Image (spheres, rainbow, N blue to C red):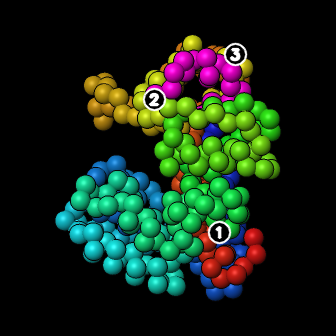
Amino acid sequence: MKLIDGTTIAEKVHEETRASVAEITKSGLCPGLAVVLVGNDPASRTYVRKKAEQCAKLGFHSLRLELPETTSQQELLAHVAQLNADPKIHGILVQSPPPPHIDEAKIVHAIAPEKDVDGFHPVNVAKLALEDPSGFVPCTPLGCRRLLLEYGIPTSGARVVVLGRSMIVGKPLALLLMSKGPGGDAIVTVAHSRTRNLGEITREADIIFSAIGRPYFLREEHVREGAVVVDVGINRVEDPSHKRGYRLVGDVDFETVAPKCSLITPVPGGVGPMTIAMLLSNTLKACRQIHGLPG
């Protein structure tokens, strides 16, 4: 069993982004990312802060817009419209989840597709399905594919099972793995919480991605010897012995599954660091495309 080190690969992506930012700033441009946070969710605030810190390290222009829990749908849409029109902003992200009174789908649809660096706008979803490289792929699936490429894990003709069917991970990841070219050409099965005889399906897989959002969901009996397992899940499990009172664990029962794997991602330190790395890579891409730059 060998670990897939997402932290190291994420830093490699950051270095590539930093070098590209340094190059385009010579022409007077600076990639700009706006992150909008509505409410005071502690996990969201931490995530937004980490994004801002990484922007500063890579030389991005960063705008952090923190709005009160009482912000109305119309007020939030007005802020999005201002960011759409701001020439210094190339990527817009509204942190999820918003308060219950906000219709998240309407907010996503309001973001200009060319600034939708999360890849959730219907235009970008369609571009992914059509294999149009000008579109933006959601950051976590994009990070998953980069891990496969970095570790030389063959996907062409491989049997891959994706556990989870969300628009954030499961569905776009399946489309990405089926697309033509490096990191694609896979035979993909999408399974979920209602899948019958799950073990029979997953034991046929060369590669398993678990993005189902349940701690320890994928167990030893689900995995064949030599499989590659990528754990996308991040779940909080109560642990009184921990200073925070909880631990972060994945969807995979790591202790029993890892010995059967040729490669496996840990949680934390696997897929998680890749998400921010690919977000900033997408923002750089948006800047290039908006200004007609190659690359």
- Alpha carbon separation for disc pair 2 and 3: 23 Å
- Residue drawn 60% across and 60% down? 126
Q: Is residue 95 left or right of residue 38?
A: right
Q: Which residues are magenta?
A: 194-211
195 within the magenta span: yes
- Residue drawn 23% across and 69% down? 72
In the rendered image, residue 79, in percent from the top left (x then y), is placed at 35, 77
- Alpha carbon separation for disc pair 2 and 1: 35 Å
Q: Residues within 10 Å of mark 2 (few under 14, many from 20)?
A: few
* Residue at which label 2 appears: 193
Q: Amino acid at mark 1?
A: Lys
- Alpha carbon separation for disc pair 1 and 3: 39 Å
Relative vertical location of residue 95 with respect to residue 177 in this rendering, above or below: below
- Residue drawn 72% across and 79% down? 293
Q: Residues within 10 Å of mark 1 (few under 14, many from 20)?
A: many
Q: Residues within 10 Å of mark 3 (few under 14, many from 20)?
A: some
In the rendered image, residue 204, in percent from the top left (x then y), is placed at 68, 21
Q: Nearer the viewer, residue 13 or 149?
A: 149
**Mark nearer the N terminus (1 vs 3):** 3
In the rendered image, residue 30, in percent from the top left (x then y), is placed at 59, 78
* Residue at which label 1 appears: 285
**Which SS class for mark 2?**
loop
The nearer-to-camera label among 2 and 3 is 2
